[in-house]
């Protein structure tokens, strides 16, 4: 899926009020930001628009906001950090209504190059556009604040929310531009090229807990890649589908036939589908998750009935690392085991290390695999780490993302 969308380089922001949807859904602990990856990722687009003389109005969601607006999910800490990083004050509109009088006044007072940040879009409670009229009203109010709109929130681009897709309709109706930012462009270039036009051999690695989460991804990638590697909890459903005893390991019994179909499909297409040949087992899941745990490694078809597989084994780690060595393009989504536990992170570390050492283009598909790569210290060795777990998965499924589709074509 090549990006043929209007970008921030395709229109002049000078003197214009530009609304930028960012992804500032950052982790907070006691009001402090613990990971600034998403803030840093937004800076190139913000700097470009401000330098061009745009009046830059930023908006984003933060958290799930289940119990209504609260200071614990306010974007105030983000405004503070942004001010430091941009070297100028980012005016924060703390109004829980997001687009109310305070926002209107703040925008009216802006000079060229100024930056303001609106309050958490989910404080409106209408971000998900249900009922539709409420979502449309919010989208129109957002559009009323600006002349042009830029979506740079890849992590939210798979949602057709008011501030992601709905707003474009109203901006376009008054002759404004609807473009994507540098981050969105980078995500789509990397993920799009990897899937639609990869340099081969193309190896895809899928991990994580459930087969159900990755049904369409497995199916789609089998048609695109040369080798598909399966690890994590979902590997046990494939092992059970082969007739193996998997003990107390995670399994999705409803998907056994699907796994058989996928193994048959790989054979039919002449693709290599790699499954664990050995597994790291324990008597049960670690509690706490990072607590000490006694483990042993057994062949994949020798898991005792009273044990649980929690990571790939040493032979599997070597097998997977070797498959990566010969690759020219690698996409990885999902850890190989319970990587939050030092004893059960070995498989994930081995795969991360093999990606770090290869000359291939390496793309990490957000979510837990991005967290693992960051946590294990391999981030700077990867070609691209996606900022959106759910969005990158839907992209790898071959789905159209509302936030991308809503931007103007060039």
Image (cartoon, grey):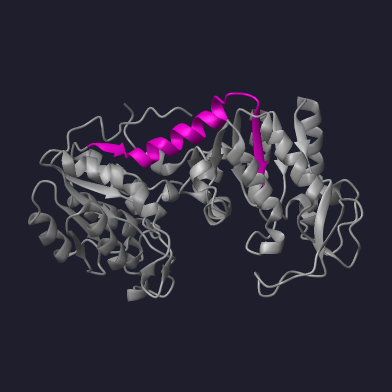
Which residue appears at 78% of the width and 70% of the height?
A: 284
Q: Residue at x 76, y 26 (%)?
A: 269
Q: Nearer the viewer, residue 199 or 382?
A: 382
Q: Which residues are magenta?
A: 177-206
Residue 220, x across and y down, in percent: 64, 35
In front of the other: 7 or 163: 7
Left or right for 212, reference 14: right
Image spot of residue 120 (x, y percent): 32, 63
Q: Quadrant of the C terminus?
A: top left
The location of residue 293, given as percent across then percent down, is: 75, 70
Res. 207 in view: no
Q: Position of residue 52 (x, y in %)?
A: 16, 38
* 279 magenta-colored: no
Q: Does residue 52 appear left or right of residue 304 in this picture?
A: left
* Count of all numbered marks drawn on residues in the image: 0
Whether residue 26 sits left or right of residue 265 in the image: it is left
Q: Is residue 203 magenta?
A: yes
Q: Residue at x 25, y 64 (%)?
A: 80
- Return the residue nearer the eye: 247 or 253: 247
* Residue 251 visible in this rendered orientation of the protein: yes
- Between 392 and 98, the residue placed more toward the observer is 392
Position of residue 69 relative to residue 201, above or below, is below
């Amino acid at each position: 899926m090549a990006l043929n969308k209007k970008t921030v380089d395709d229109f002049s922001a000078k003197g214009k009020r530009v609304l930028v949807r960012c992804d500032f859904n950052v982790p907070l602990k006691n009001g402090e930001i613990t990971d600034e990856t998403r803030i840093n990722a937004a800076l190139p687009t913000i700097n470009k628009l401000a330098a061009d003389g745009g009046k830059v109005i930023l908006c984003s969601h933060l958290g799930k906001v289940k119990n209504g607006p609260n200071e614990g999910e306010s974007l105030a800490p983000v405004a503070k950090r942004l001010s430091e990083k941009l070297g100028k004050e980012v005016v924060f509109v703390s109004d829980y209504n997001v687009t109310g009088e305070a926002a209107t006044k703040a925008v009216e007072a802006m000079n060229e190059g100024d930056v303001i940040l609106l309050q958490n879009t989910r404080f409106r409670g209408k971000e998900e556009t249900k009922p539709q009229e409420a979502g449309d009203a919010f989208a129109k109010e957002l559009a009323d604040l600006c002349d042009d709109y830029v979506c740079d929130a890849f992590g939210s681009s798979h949602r057709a929310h008011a501030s992601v897709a709905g707003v474009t309709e109203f901006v376009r109706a008054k002759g404004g531009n609807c473009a994507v930012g540098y981050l969105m462009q980078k995500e789509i270039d990397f993920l799009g090229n990897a899937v639609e036009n990869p340099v081969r051999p193309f190896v895809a690695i899928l991990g994580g807990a459930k087969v159900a989460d990755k049904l369409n991804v497995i199916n789609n990638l089998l048609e695109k890649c040369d080798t598909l590697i399966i690890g994590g909890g979902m590997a046990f459903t494939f092992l059970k589908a082969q007739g193996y005893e998997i003990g107390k390991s995670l399994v999705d019994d409803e998907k056994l036939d699907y796994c058989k179909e996928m193994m048959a499909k790989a054979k039919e297409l002449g693709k290599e589908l790699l499954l664990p040949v050995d597994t790291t087992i324990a008597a049960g899941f670690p509690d706490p998750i990072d607590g000490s745990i006694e483990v042993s490694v057994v062949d994949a078809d020798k898991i005792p009935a009273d044990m649980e597989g929690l990571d790939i084994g040493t032979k599997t780690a070597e097998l997977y690392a070797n498959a990566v060595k010969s690759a020219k393009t690698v996409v990885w989504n999902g850890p190989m085991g319970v990587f939050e536990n030092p004893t059960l992170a070995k498989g994930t570390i081995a795969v991360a290390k093999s990606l770090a050492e290869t000359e291939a283009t390496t793309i990490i598909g957000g979510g837990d695999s991005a967290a693992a790569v960051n946590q294990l210290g391999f981030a700077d060795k990867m070609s691209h780490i996606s900022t959106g777990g759910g969005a990158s998965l839907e992209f790898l499924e071959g789905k159209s993302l509302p936030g991308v589709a809503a931007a103007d074509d060039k």
